[in-house]
Amino acid sequence: MGIEQIANARGASDGTLLSGARMVVAALLREGVDTVWGYPGGAVLPIYDALQENEHVTHLLVRHEQAAVHAADGYARATGEVGVALVTSGPGVTNAVTGIATAYFDSIPIVVIAGNVPSASIGTDAFQECDTVGITRSIVKHNFLVLGIEHLALTLKKAFHIARTGRPGPVVVDIPKDVLQAIAEFVYPEQVQIRSCRERTDAHPAQIRRAARALRTAHRPCIFVGGGAIAAQASEEIVALARLLDAPVTNTLMALGAIPGSDARCLGMPGMHGTYEANMAMQNCDVMIALGARFDDRVIGDPDDFLKHDRSIIHVDIDPATIDKRVKVDIPIVGDAKAVVRTILKHLHDEPPALTGRDQWWHDIGAWRDRRCLAYKRDDRLIKPQFVIEKLWEITGGEAYVCSDVGQHQMWAAQLYAFNRPRRWINSGGLGTMGVGLPYAMGVKRAFPDADVVTVTGDGSIQMCIQELSTCKQYDLGVKIVSLNNGYLGMVRQLQHVHYGDRFSQSYMDALPDFAALARAYGHVGLRIERPGDVEAALRESLALKDRTVFMDFAIDGSENVWPMVRAGSGLTDMLLSSNDIEY
C-alpha cells in the first residue's frame, strides 16, 4: 500500500512507513478526532498536504489563530472531547497564546499542534522561529518539542492522554518541519503510562466516610459546585445529593447547568455578581461540600472574611494542588467528583440524614430570595439588557447553547438564563478573555449542527474576533449573535462607576460600526433592534433561520449595571445591590 492510499485509510497500521505529517493525521484518526481548526503556514504545510488527502478529518480554516484555539476550546467544552487546533511557527504560535491560556485557566482539554523551523535552525533566529515551549510553558498542562520522527507517534499519544486525564488542560506539540517531512515506521501505542498523569478515582475511603457523616448531621448544608464537576460529568449525582440532603446548591460561573436552573434547590451563582441568596447561603451554612471548585477570588471574595464564618468544609477535587490552596478545609478528598459523590450517596442511603433544621434553613433562604436581587425596572422606550436575556431564555426554553463573550453581557446571561443541562453555557471564566464568544459558537455549532447556538456579546468583545464571520459564511455555521450594544466597554464603565467616581476614562466607544450592515457585508443576516417591543420578534425571526448566521444588534440602555456586586477585597456578603449602596 502506498503512502497516498494510507493517508486515505481510517488509520495506518503499525509498522507502515509514513512521513511525520501523515503520522499526525493517522494519530488524529486513532484518537477519534474528526475536526481540526487552523490556519496554514510554511512550517505546517506538510500536515496540510496530508489532511487534504484524508476524508475523515475535517479542517476548518479560521481567519486568526486565536480563533482556531478558541473554536477547538468551545468544541471541547460542549462535547467533553479533546479539541484540536493547528498553527504554524512564529506568529502562528504567538497568535494562539491567548487561546491556550484561556483553555488552561478553565481546565479544558485541547491539543495544539504547532509547526516549527527545521531542527538544525532552532536557536539561530531563523525566519518565523520562536521558542514555543518557553512561551507556552506557564499556560499549558504540558508541552513537547519533537526533535526526531522516532518520537512523534508516542508524543502525540501522550499529548492526548495528558489533555484528557485527571484535571484536563491544553497540551502543545511543537514539531519542526524536517520531522514532518521525515519517513519512518508508524507505531502508535494503544495506551501510555505517565506516573505524574494518572486518574485519581481511588479517593480515601475514610475521608469519604467523614464527609458522609458531616453531611448526615448537618442542619444547614450547602453544595458548592465548580467547573470540575462538569468535567467529571457529575450532574446526575449532584442532583441526587441535593434531593437526599434537601440542600441548596450554588454553581460557579463555570458550573451553571450542573443542577437545573429551574430546580427549587438551585440558588444560582455565588460570588462577585452572584445572587444574594447564594452568597448568604455560602456564608451561613454549617457544612459545605465543594465539588470541583477552586474557591476563586471572584467567588468567595476576601478569604479571611470567608473563613471567619464557622462551618465545616469538605473539598472534593481531582487535583490535589487545588485543595488548601486558597482556603483551609476540614475534610479534603482527592478524587473524581462523580465517583466520590456516588460513594457518599451510598453511605447516606445506608444511613439516611436526619434533615434536622431544614425548615428553618429554607425559611432563611426564602427570606434572602425575597430580596429579589436580580429585579430591574422595565422601560417602554429603552431596551433593558436583562429583558433580552429573559426573552432568549423564554423562546429557547433554556435549551440553547449560549456562548458568551466577557463583560456585563456575560454576567446578565449567567444570572438570567436558567440552564437546565450541563455544557450548555460556554464562556471564559478564569482568564476572562474578550473575543471568545463567536469562535466558541463556531466550535459548538460544528459539534451540534442541529442545535440552537447563540453568542451573547457586547459591542467591545465582538470586535476582538469579528473576522470569524467569514469562517461562519464559508462553512455555513448558522450561529445567532445577540449583541447587547451600549456604546461602552460596559464592565470597565461599571468599575469606573463603582470605584472611580464616574470618571469614564477610555471606556466609551464613539466610533462603532453599523454591525447589522457589517454582518450583511459578510453574507449574513443583520438586524438592528432599538425598541423593546421589537425584541421578541427579532429573536424568534432569527432563531427560525436555522441555517443562517444572524447578527442581532440590540441598542440597550447604556446606564444599566450588573447587580449585585461584591467589590474586590470585600467579604462575600458585603454586596452592592444598586448604585445607591456605593460610597466613594
Image (cartoon, rainbow, N blue to C red):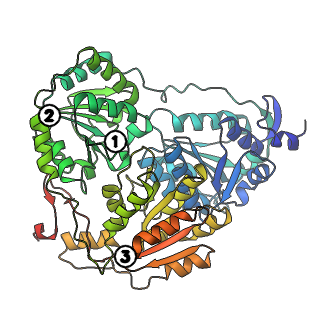
Q: Nearer the viewer, residue 551 or 254?
A: 551
Please state which amino acid type lies under the numbered disc 3. Gly
User: Which quadrant does the N terminus fall into?
Assistant: top right
Identify whether 368 is placed above or below 442: above
In three-dimensional space, the C-alpha distance between marks 1 and 2, rounded to whole angstroms, equals 20 Å
From the top left corner, tell me how far across and down residue 376 is, in percent: 22, 67
Identify whether 502 is placed above or below 315: below
From the top left corner, tell me how far across and down residue 119 is, in percent: 70, 48
- Visible residue check, residue 300: yes
Q: Nearer the viewer, residue 551 or 292?
A: 551
Please state which amino acid type lies under the numbered disc 2. Arg
Disc marking residue 533: 3
Disc marking residue 220: 2
Q: Which residue is pictured at 35% across the width and 43% down the height?
A: 260
**Residue ID for mark 1:** 226
User: Which quadrant does the C terminus fall into?
Assistant: bottom left
Disc on the earlier residue, 1 or 2: 2
Q: Which residue is pictured at 20% across the width and 20% down the height?
A: 213
Looking at the rendered image, the disc whose residue lies closer to the viewer, 3 or 1, is: 3
Q: Which residue is pictured at 69% across the width and 53% down the height?
A: 59
Q: Describe residue 432's horizontal placement relative to residue 85 as left or right.
A: left
**Label 3 neighbour load within 10 Å: few <14, some 14-19, many 20+:** few
- Visible residue check, residue 318: no
Disc on the earlier residue, 2 or 3: 2
Q: Which residue is pictured at 44% across the width and 38% down the height?
A: 231
Looking at the rendered image, the disc whose residue lies closer to the viewer, 1 or 2, is: 2
Query: Tag 1's secondary structure?
Result: loop
In three-dimensional space, the C-alpha distance between marks 2 and 3, rounded to whole angstroms, equals 44 Å
**Quadrant of residue 556 in the image?**
bottom left
Query: Tag 2's secondary structure?
Result: loop
Q: Residue furthest right?
A: 1
